[in-house]
Image (tube, rainbow, N blue to C red):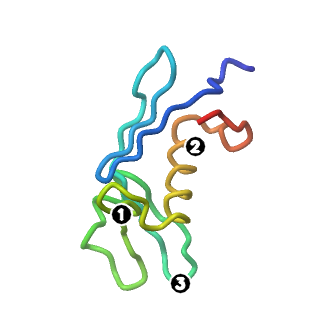
Amino acid sequence: MLGIPTRVAIDLGTSTTLVALPHRGIILREPTVIARELPSSQVVAVGAEAHAMLGRTPGTLVADRPLRSGAIANFRTTEILIRALLQRTHPLYRFIRPDV
């Protein structure tokens, strides 16, 4: 299918998330952090960009780690993080649903 990998492996870690493809290995390694604007919850940054915002955000932004002690603390934020990382991996993953 257009040479786009349909299988993707994701390792959600408390501090780092890895995305890997078969026969290519790890293609993305990002901090497990997401920055959102309040009160709309619109995503401002994900991964390294959001990590740089930790502890340095104004009152209208919140940078957060959706996993705590190896467990998902906020399911909706984790879902947004995974979608953003998949789109960063390949823009067509917005339309083509890979097997994860």
Q: CA distance from mark 1 to mark 2?
A: 19 Å
Helix, strand or loop at mark 3: loop
Q: Which residue is mark 3?
A: 39
Q: Which residue is mark 2?
A: 87
Residue 46, horizontal then vertical, whole percent: 43, 56
Q: Nearer the viewer, residue 10 or 84?
A: 10
Residue 11, horizontal then vertical, whole percent: 41, 40
- Which three-letter amino acid code belongs to the residue tagged 2? Gln
Mark 1 against mark 2, which lies toward the viewer? Answer: 1
Mark 3 against mark 1, which lies toward the viewer? Answer: 1
Q: Which residue is mark 1?
A: 65
Disc on res. 94: none
Q: Nearer the viewer, residue 11 or 4?
A: 11
Q: Decide if residue 9 is on the left or right side of residue 35.
A: right
Q: Residues within 10 Å of mark 1 (few under 14, many from 20)?
A: many
Q: CA distance from mark 3 to mark 1?
A: 18 Å
- Which three-letter amino acid code belongs to the residue tagged 1? Arg
Mark 3 or 1, nearer chain start: 3
Quadrant position of residue 3: top right
Marks 1 and 2: CB-CB under 8 Å? no
Q: Decide if residue 30 is on the left or right side of residue 86.
A: left
Quadrant position of residue 59: bottom left
Q: Residues within 10 Å of mark 2 (few under 14, many from 20)?
A: some
